[in-house]
Image: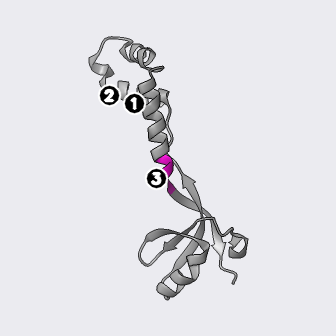
Amino acid sequence: MKKLSKIRKDDYILMYNADMNTYTVITPDEIDYFMKEYKGDELKFYTAIKSVAKTSVKEVLKLLTEQYENSQYDDWSEAMYDDMKDLPEVKAFVEAFNKAAEANGSYLEGEQILIDE
């Protein structure tokens, strides 16, 4: 367990409300508010680990070509990959996807936080 006093003010915390079976991403400064707001509920606090769905040109093209390869000629997916892997439009799409994924990351439970104040 990690003590709340050891959490940086700019870190995120994942609050789990067992009574409502919900997770909420909060800041250390908001813990007091939520403890008062949900007084009587079983609350647990965890360090928040950001999870971002990143991809690559190879992964994107593999997923797309796998959707159609059964109805195409042998080695079609390899030919498509070779023809598309260096296209600036494909690279731009992957960059845009990764940028949006970074802005829309999810948070997973890290180490449980001990409220020590």
Sequence-first tag of 1 and 3:
1
Tell me if label 2 and label 1 are in contact, CB under 8 Å. yes
Label 3, label 2: how far apart the Cα atoms are: 26 Å
- Check disc 2 and report the residue beneath it: 67
- Residue at image coords 50%, 72%: 16
- Residue at image coords 52%, 58%: 107
Q: Where is residue 115 drawn, in percent x and y? A: 65, 79
Name the secondary structure under disc 3: loop
Sequence-first tag of 3 and 2:
2
Tell me the tag on residue 104.
Answer: 3
Label 2, label 1: how far apart the Cα atoms are: 7 Å
- Check disc 1 and report the residue beneath it: 63
Name the secondary structure under disc 1: helix
- Residue at image coords 42%, 33%: 93
Amino acid on which the number 2 mark rests in the picture: Gln
Can you say whether 17 is above or below 83 in the image? below
Front residue of 51 and 17: 51
Amino acid on which the number 1 mark rests in the picture: Leu
Q: Where is residue 29 drawn, in percent x and y? A: 60, 76
